[in-house]
């Protein structure tokens, strides 16, 4: 039996572990958690350039991640599962995160509220990730949605957004810097 191939010539069996929508989002969650951990080590530090760099990576990662969820994943999940409240809550959480991201992007790392805002953003994201991974993703898997097709759409959109935002992406990583990404690596421009 031959494996069905995707537009890129990769068999759907090979792609499953790489482009499954939930696997993509879960990998994004891991990447941003690492970035928040890196920032935690800088709290109280005078190295404002390093703080600025890490927070720029966090903001980019979250901006791209929320965009692909809102444009592609949430509409599909809303259609596939019977839990509008769960999707609505996730969208409200995104709005709160976006507000903090905008505030951080307008601030200098030397601002006395900078560390606190990054910390609170990290706490919001931890809560959001916990709900997605322990509730939403389970319901989506049970709904037997085509997570490969959905993942391929999300991956393509993510690459487009990363390029548009000047970060470049080999793909699996939100920041374009993951050396462990199954899709390769890419440095930020």
Image (cartoon, helix red, strand yellow):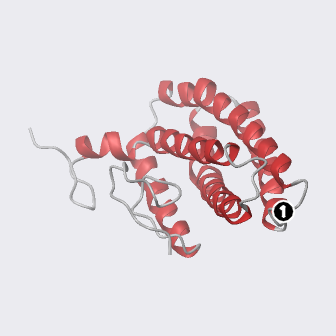
Q: Which residue is mark 1?
A: 110
Nearer the observer, 7 or 92? 92
Q: Position of residue 131 (x, y in %)?
A: 67, 29
For this view, does 45 lie left or right of residue 53? right
For residue 57, what is the image quadrant?
Answer: bottom right
In terms of depth relative to the viewer, which is nearer, 164 or 36? Answer: 36
Q: Residue at x 63, y 41 (%)?
A: 37
The residue under the point 69% across, 29% down is 83
Circle 1 crowding by C-alpha within 10 Å: few under 14, some 14–19, many from 20: some
Residue 161 falls left or right of residue 159? right
Up the image or down, 95 lies above or below 9; here it is above
> Residue drawn at (71%, 40%), measured in percent from left and top?
125
The part of the image, by quadrant, that contains residue 103 is bottom right
Q: Which residue is at the far front? A: 46
* Nearest the eye: 137 or 127: 127
Q: Residue furthest left?
A: 1
- Residue 2: x, y in percent? 11, 43
Label 1 element class: loop
How far across and down, in percent of the image, does residue 7 sit? 27, 61
Residue 9, image x and y in percent?
A: 21, 59
């Amino acid at each position: 039996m031959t494996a069905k191939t995707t537009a890129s010539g990769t068999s759907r069996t090979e792609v499953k572990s790489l482009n499954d929508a939930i696997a993509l989002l879960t990998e994004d969650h891991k990447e941003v958690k690492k970035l928040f951990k890196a920032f935690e080590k800088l709290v109280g530090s005078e190295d404002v350039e390093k703080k600025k760099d890490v927070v720029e990576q966090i903001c980019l990662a979250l901006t791209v991640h929320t965009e692909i969820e809102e444009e592609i994943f949430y509409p599909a999940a809303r259609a596939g599962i019977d839990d509008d409240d769960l999707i609505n809550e996730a969208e409200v959480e995104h709005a709160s995160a976006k507000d903090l991201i905008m505030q951080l992007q307008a601030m200098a790392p030397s601002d006395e509220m900078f560390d606190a805002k990054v910390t609170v953003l990290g706490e919001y994201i931890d809560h959001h990730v916990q709900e997605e991974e322990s509730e939403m993703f389970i319901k989506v898997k049970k709904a037997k949605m085509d997570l490969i097709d959905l993942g391929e759409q999300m991956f393509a959109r993510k690459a487009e957004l990363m390029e548009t935002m000047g970060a470049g992406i080999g793909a699996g990583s939100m920041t374009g810097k993951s050396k462990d990404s199954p899709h390769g690596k890419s440095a930020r421009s």
